[in-house]
Image (spheres, rainbow, N blue to C red):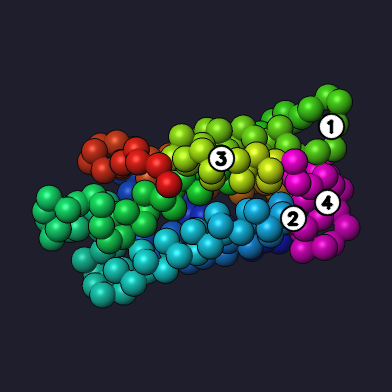
Amino acid sequence: MALLMEHQFRQLPADRQVETRPFLEAVSYLPPFFDCLGSAIFAPIKADIAGNITKIKAVFDTNPARFKTLQHILEAEKEMHGAQWPKVGATLALMWLKRGLRFIQVFLQSLVDGEKDDSNPNLVRVNVTKAYEIALKKYHGWWVQQLFRAALFASPYKSDFLKALSKGREVKDEECLEKIRKFLLNFTPTVDAIYELYNKMHADLDYTV
């Protein structure tokens, strides 16, 4: 659980603006989350998330004052890139990043809600499947979907996942789940706010990879 709780996301202000620097700091600790799922098939998502964080940070670092919030980045890039926007820059990177974050959010929420396969209650396959179908499946072509179908069958036991999330420490499942609930208190609204921003600015793209 240390993986999540040591780097909490900030509570959103009243205007639901996501401040770029603390967002990047918090999200930069999330790629190892996919190591906890125990399958190398999740490595592409991990690499994709890490790569998109790097791209957003590179843009932010060029002018931190101008790019103070994620909305400022999208608005500035829309002005800078014209007809190419939103297929470029940090806007495109954040579009894909938010989908990876939604995967994490749906997966963790499903876990704390107690959703499980009654015939295999200690597997997280049900939770991973739900997260994939909601967050990523529609953006993946047939071949990538087949890879993830294989990954689902390699999903770890819930007890092993929670232990990995706790960096190998022996902790009670309910204690872990309670910490996940606390993590989601700020993480979920942050992900929701980014989705709302993309809807408001018509910045989402539906192409598949």
Gap between marks 3 and 4 measured at Cα: 25 Å
Q: Which amino acid does label 4 sit on?
A: Asp
Q: Disc 3 or disc 4, which is closer to the eye?
A: 3
How far, Cα to Cα, is label 2 from label 4? 9 Å
User: Quadrant location of residue 62?
Assistant: bottom left
Question: Which numbered mark, 1 or 2, is in the foreground of this view?
Answer: 2
Q: Is residue 205 left or right of residue 38?
A: left
Element carrying mark 3: helix
The residue carrying mark 2 is 38
Position of residue 23 in the picture relative to residue 34 (left or right): left
Residue receiving disc 4: 160
Pointer 2 and pointer 4: residues touching (CB < 8 Å)? yes
The disc at residue 121 is: 1
Q: How many marks?
A: 4
Labels 1 and 2: the sequence-earlier one = 2
- Assign a secondary structure to mark 2: loop
Circle nearer the N terminus (3, 4) = 3
- Relative to the observer, which residue lies in front, 93 or 113? 93
Identify the residue at horizontal 47%, vertical 50% (top origin).
11
- Magenta residues, as a range? 153-175
Q: Distance between the residues labelled 1 and 4?
A: 13 Å
Residue type pointed to by label 1: Pro
Pick whichever, 7 or 31, lies toward us. Answer: 31
Q: Is residue 105 above or below residue 166?
A: above
Residue 80's tag is: none
In the displayed orientation, state which residue is furthest to the bottom: 62
Where residue 89 sits: x, y (%)?
27, 61
